[in-house]
Amino acid sequence: MDVFHLRRSCPGWIARLLRPPLRFALYELIKEKKHATDDELLDILGKGEAYSMNELNKALLDLEILGTITVRWVAKEKRRVEFVEAAAAPVRYAE
């Protein structure tokens, strides 16, 4: 029996333990799309699993602290999440 069928037949709390960490799924999704709003991310991620806005906020904060994304307010209740490309090393000029 594979994990997909196991998750369907097991109780909800076990299914939550078997799902991958949200920050990894968010990182891959934002890396692919380059930018999205928090509502779009919740809709895309909500198709497979039900995530709360609180879980999304915690994962976004983790990724922002790691420096892999930036989060900016677009409207009062909407945020834009952008992927941060690896920054080039600073250029040192000879004196």
Image (tube, rainbow, N blue to C red):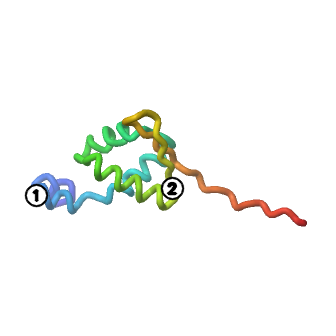
Structural crowding at the residue carrying mark 2, measured as other residues with C-alpha within 10 Å and reported as few (<14), some (14–19) or many (≥20): some
Q: Nearer the viewer, residue 7 or 42?
A: 42
**Of marks 2 and 1, the one in the foreground:** 2
The residue drawn where x is 10% and y is 55% is: 9
Q: Is residue 32 left or right of residue 19?
A: right
The location of residue 74, given as percent across then percent down, is 46, 35
Name the residue beneath numbered marker 1: 10
Instruction: Tell me the element at label 1.
Output: loop
In the picture, the quarter occupied by the C terminus is bottom right
Eyeballing the image, is 35 above or below 86? above
Q: Which mark is residue 68?
A: 2
Q: What is the residue that sits farthest to the front in this orientation?
A: 76
Eyeballing the image, is 94 above or below 44? below
Report the amino acid beneath label 1: Cys
Q: Nearer the viewer, residue 78 or 6?
A: 78
The residue drawn where x is 43% and y is 51% is: 28
Q: Nearer the viewer, residue 30 or 64?
A: 64
The residue drawn where x is 58% and y is 51% is: 85
Res 37 → quadrant: top left
